[in-house]
């Protein structure tokens, strides 16, 4: 069995299978990774939303970010930074959530590359 | 066997061989039961504020959802411990890590629709939350999947009820046999001690 912690590159798909504005979830050992191509660039990140652990593969793109389907948080796919922390206040009369509940880390990014028509991901 | 020595747990070994990320699963379950428990608490407040002629007709439906959400907590927590997980020692941490927002009473609670919107939002988040657990365990961890899908069935019903109350879209709702019956996770399912 391969070790997800070493520097080995994992071939995940053919280059032409990862077309512009698409993403897919791949699993290396038991680690779910979101890979895709956006604005001409490849990205790879952990599929787990840093906020509450939802699958980012169920989200959608917004410019260079992925929008989580669970609470609408947006993370930049290339820097990993939290770009938008959506408010709970869907109406003016709603009470905002506690800051401890709202806070989030950044995305875990992985190295992704293309070589001879194959896309590779390194977990470290 | 000395105290504290844990033998090989075949039930976990099988999950790992099936490709389940057990640590991630425990995290999602802890967040899911956190949301159920906090929702139970906040629904108590919301139900209390279902007042007046309109509110009287709705409070029993809120009560069903309130008790059933507590039942979801009861149904899934034993599985969390079976998997080797545990509830946070501090209830504040438990609430902060919950997978869904707190269903706070809105400022304009006298408008019953405002309460219904908060209830609906909470149920929709719970559907997404347990959907994650179902997706992660289907075909790999039948025990967790079975509990999660039972919870999902009731959350989907709750969503339909609140949508019906807000929009008049028929939901198929008819009253439970008793408050918080939990037809899927309740005594018929044998998962909780009603």
Image (spheres, coloured by chain):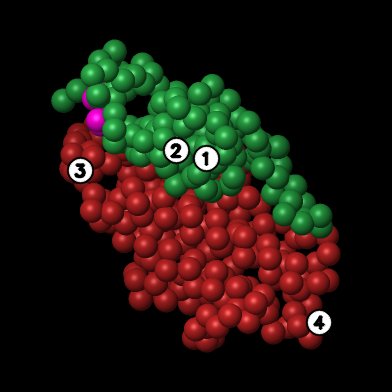
- Name the magenta segment's main secondary structure: strand
Q: Earlier in the sequence, mark 4 or mark 3?
A: 3
Residue B25: x and y in percent read 37, 43
User: Nearest the camera: A88 or B47?
Assistant: A88
- Of all chains, the one bearing label 4 is B
SS under mark 1: strand
Mark nearest the camera among 2 and 3 is: 2
The magenta segment is A10-14
SS under mark 4: helix
Provide the residue designation for mark 1. A61
Q: Residues within 10 Å of mark 1 (few under 14, many from 20)?
A: some
Q: Quadrant of the C terminus of chain B?
A: bottom left
Is mark 1 in CB contact (under 8 Å) with mark 2?
A: yes
Chain A: its colour in the image is green
Provide the residue designation for mark 3. B18
Mark nearest the camera among 1 and 3 is: 1
Specify whether residue B51 is painted magenta.
no
Q: Quadrant of residue A75?
A: top right
Q: Residue at x 55, y 69 (%)?
A: B159
Residue B63 visible in image:
no
């Amino acid at each position: 069995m391969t070790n997800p912690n070493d520097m080995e590159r994992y071939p995940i798909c053919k280059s032409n299978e990862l077309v512009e504005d698409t993403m897919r979830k791949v699993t290396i050992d038991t680690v779910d990774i979101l890979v895709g191509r956006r604005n001409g660039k490849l990205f790879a990140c952990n599929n787990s939303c840093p906020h509450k652990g939802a699958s980012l593969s169920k989200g959608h793109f917004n410019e260079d970010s992925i929008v989580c389907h669970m609470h609408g948080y947006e993370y930049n796919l290339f820097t990993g930074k939290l770009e938008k922390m959506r408010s709970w206040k869907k109406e003016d009369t709603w009470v905002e959530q506690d800051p401890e509940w709202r806070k989030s880390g950044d995305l875990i990014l992985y190295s992704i590359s293309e070589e001879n028509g194959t896309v590779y991901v390194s977990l470290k | 066997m000395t105290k504290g020595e844990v033998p090989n747990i075949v039930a976990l070994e099988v999950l790992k061989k099936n490709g389940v990320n057990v640590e991630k699963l425990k995290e999602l379950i802890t967040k899911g039961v956190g949301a159920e428990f906090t929702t139970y608490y906040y629904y108590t407040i919301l139900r209390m504020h279902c007042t007046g002629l309109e509110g009287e007709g709705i409070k029993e439906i809120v009560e069903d959802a309130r008790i059933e959400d507590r039942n979801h907590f009861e149904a899934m927590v034993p599985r969390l411990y079976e998997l080797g997980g545990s509830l946070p020692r501090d209830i504040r941490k438990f609430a902060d890590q919950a997978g869904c927002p707190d269903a706070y009473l809105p400022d304009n609670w006298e408008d019953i629709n405002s309460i219904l919107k908060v209830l609906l939002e909470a149920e929709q988040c719970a559907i997404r939350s347990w959907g994650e657990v179902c997706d992660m365990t289907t075909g790999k961890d039948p025990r967790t999947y079975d509990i999660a899908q039972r919870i999902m069935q009731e959350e989907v019903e709750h969503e339909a009820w609140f949508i019906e109350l807000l929009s008049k879209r028929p939901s198929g709702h008819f009253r439970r046999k008793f408050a918080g019956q939990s037809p899927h996770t309740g005594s018929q399912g044998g998962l909780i001690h009603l």
